[in-house]
Amino acid sequence: MRFADIPSRLAPLQQPPDPIVINHIITVEGDGSPKTACYDIEVEVDDAYKSMVHTYLSNMHTSQELSAIDNKIHELVEQINQMKVHREFYLEFSRDPQTFISRWLASQCRDFWVMTDATPGHPEEERHAEFYNAHWTQEAVMRYFYNRISQRRQDLEHALGLNNN
């Protein structure tokens, strides 16, 4: 939270002052029976705290200084949090390196699959030759060779200076 945001965050938490109660007996001529009456009288009162905070925060020099200091504090807190994460990472590694590396590699693998939207293959099926005898493999091989030949042709034309572009 930034320093300049403190007054706006505290304002809803501040409660209005308790009402002032004045007990006074008013006698009215004629009917002598006492009557109880309650009146709400609203009185406007200047909020000294609000004007003081407004004056303090409206000073540009102070505001700029506070903003710079506040930004520095946020950067330092972020660095502390980052160092805490690094410390926990290395502490876990130091406790049990083998288990840590296994879990870390599994996590990295999951992250890779999520980032690339790739689906992990079926390793057991890919071990067998029947998997590669499917109809798509012939087209994939033809595309692969076509791309390789095109790349080599471009390299050769570039080396001989025969650019057709």
Image: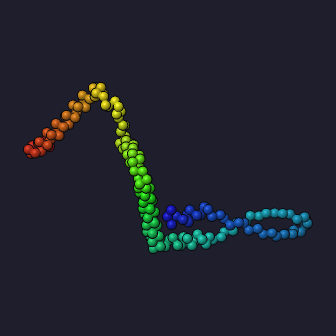
Q: Position of residue 140 (x, y in %)?
A: 25, 31
Residue sitting at 53 percent across and 73 percent down? 55
The answer to whether 9 is drawn above or below residue 157 in the figure is below
Nearer to the camera, 57 or 118: 118
Quadrant in which residue 120 is drawn: top left
Decide if residue 60 is in sight here. no
* Quadrant showing the C terminus: top left
Residue sitting at 37 percent across and 37 percent down? 119
Q: Check the image and tell me how it is coloured.
A: rainbow
Q: Position of residue 82 (x, y in %)?
A: 42, 58
Quadrant in which residue 122 is drawn: top left
The answer to whether 13 is drawn above or below residue 103 in the figure is below
Q: How many marks?
A: 0
- The extreme left residue here reads 160
Taking 15 as reference, is 148 left or right?
Answer: left
Residue sitting at 47 percent across and 73 percent down? 62
Decide if residue 55 is in sight here. yes
The answer to whether 34 is drawn above or below residue 139 in the figure is below
Residue sitting at 76 percent across and 68 percent down? 21
Q: Position of residue 129 (x, y in %)?
A: 28, 27
